[in-house]
Image (cartoon, rainbow, N blue to C red):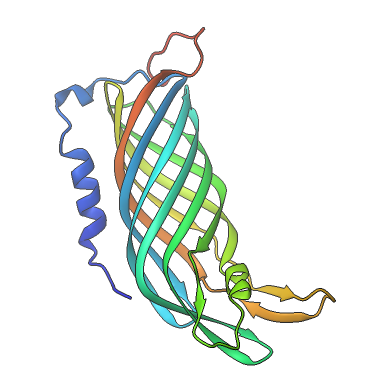
Amino acid sequence: MRMLSRSIPVAALALSLSALPAAAQEPGNGNFQWYVGGQGGVMFFDTPTQDRTGIPTFGGQTLIVARRTGLLLSVEEGVGSDETSSYSDLSGTQTVTFNDIRRYSAVLMAFPIRAAAQPYLGVGYGIMHVVNPTPTSLAAFQSDAEELGSTGFGTFLAGITFQLGRFMAFGQYQITTSPSNSVVADADGNAVAFGRLLTGPTHTFSGGLRFGLGSARESVKTGGYK
């Protein structure tokens, strides 16, 4: 378990923007384009046994841009170390250890204005789970921890992107909704475990690069976001 300094998200954004020359002042060819890319940053999360903690996160994404809207599909892995959480079962409170948090997101994007530095907003949905949660007690079941460590979420993100030929450099912030408590039942429908391994919303600051693969609609000539 470790806290990261607040400089990490700033550094991630700085790295993603450091290679931008004056050409970024020209509007890009974003209409009906496919982009793939990667990002890095920091994710903040809470559990029942530890306060808000920051861990480095890395991931990949695909973005389809059509005029002023887009669809962003992404996967991210928050890399922790000896993180702890807990849930309740018929024996009492069970402590769990884990390292990583994995998140899958699908986000509808909007690019409201056309500019050299384009802001964007997005709303969507996703699935997040802790990777390989391990109860510390031999009396606890790992299957219960795995079920209580997985949750769906709604999400909102906001960021800014710079077009450079087929590349887009970006920095963004993403927040997810808080998971509600869940119940694990046996074959007879009796509750055997309840709680959540993650509590509260997650907050992620990240930056990265997207690479254009070409037109997502061959019949359309690309221009700027119009």
The x, y position of residue 226, in whole percent, is 43, 18
Identity of the residue drawn at 54% across and 43% down: 106
Instruction: Out of 119 and 168, give the one closest to the viewer.
Output: 168
Position in image of residue 50 (x %, y %)? 41, 80
Using residue 47 as the reference point, say whether residue 38 is left or right of it: left
| Camera-side residue of 120 and 154 | 154
Vertical comparison of 58 with 197: above or below: above
Residue visible at 24% across and 64% down?
Answer: 6
Position of the N terminus by quadrant: bottom left
- Relative horizontal placement of residue 8, taking residue 218 as reference (left or right): left
Vertical order, 181 against 219 (above or below) = below
Residue furthest to the front in view is 138
The image quarter containing residue 18 is top left
- The residue closer to the viewer here, 94 or 62, is 94
Q: Is residue 57 above or below residue 50?
A: above
Q: Residue furthest bottom?
A: 91
Residue at the image position 58 percent from the left and 69 percent from the top = 146
Figure label count = 0
The percent position of residue 27, horizontal first and vertical second, equals 30, 20
On screen, residue 162 versus residue 187, left or right, reads: left
The residue sitting at 53% across, 62% down in the picture is: 129
